[in-house]
Amino acid sequence: MTVRLEGSVTLPSAAEVRTRLLEALARGGPLIVDCAAVEEADLSLVQLLVAARRHAARSGAGFRLEPPPSPAVVALFERAGLPLPDPT
């Protein structure tokens, strides 16, 4: 299941993004998160992606960011001192 994120993914939208990720994970199969169109993001996106990857790994589902994330997402992970989540 692919979850496409775009525009601003910040704390005010975190609950909605969380719901979308959990619904996709509940459907089973690999979770593909498309962050290519994210223009603005904060640490809530980092937290959501790391948690989604962990959830997918625990349940035996795959996880990957595809296509490559936007420069805003890459820069956010760099500022946080974290690598982008590895595929599972």
Image (tube, rainbow, N blue to C red):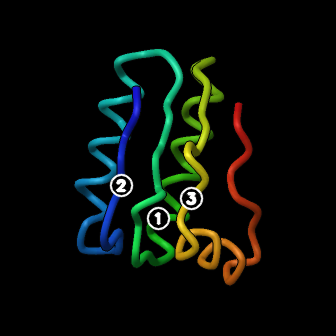
The residues tagged by marks 2 and 1 sit, at their Cα atoms, a distance apart of: 10 Å
The residues tagged by marks 1 and 3 sit, at their Cα atoms, a distance apart of: 12 Å
Q: Point out the image quarter for the C terminus.
A: top right
Q: Using the image, determine if residue 51 lies above or below residue 56.
A: below
Residue on which disc 3 sits: 69
First in sequence: mark 3 or mark 2?
2
Spot occupied by residue 11 in the image (x, y as percentages of width and height):
32, 74
Query: Which numbered dot is residue 45?
Result: 1
First in sequence: mark 1 or mark 3?
1
The residues tagged by marks 3 and 2 sit, at their Cα atoms, a distance apart of: 10 Å
Dividing the picture into quadrants, the one containing residue 9 is bottom left
Q: Amino acid at mark 2?
A: Leu
Callout 1: helix, strand or loop?
Answer: helix
Labels 2 and 1 touching (C-beta < 8 A): yes
Q: Using the image, determine if residue 53 lies above or below residue 45.
A: above
Residue on which disc 2 sits: 5
Left or right: 52, with 84 as reference point: left
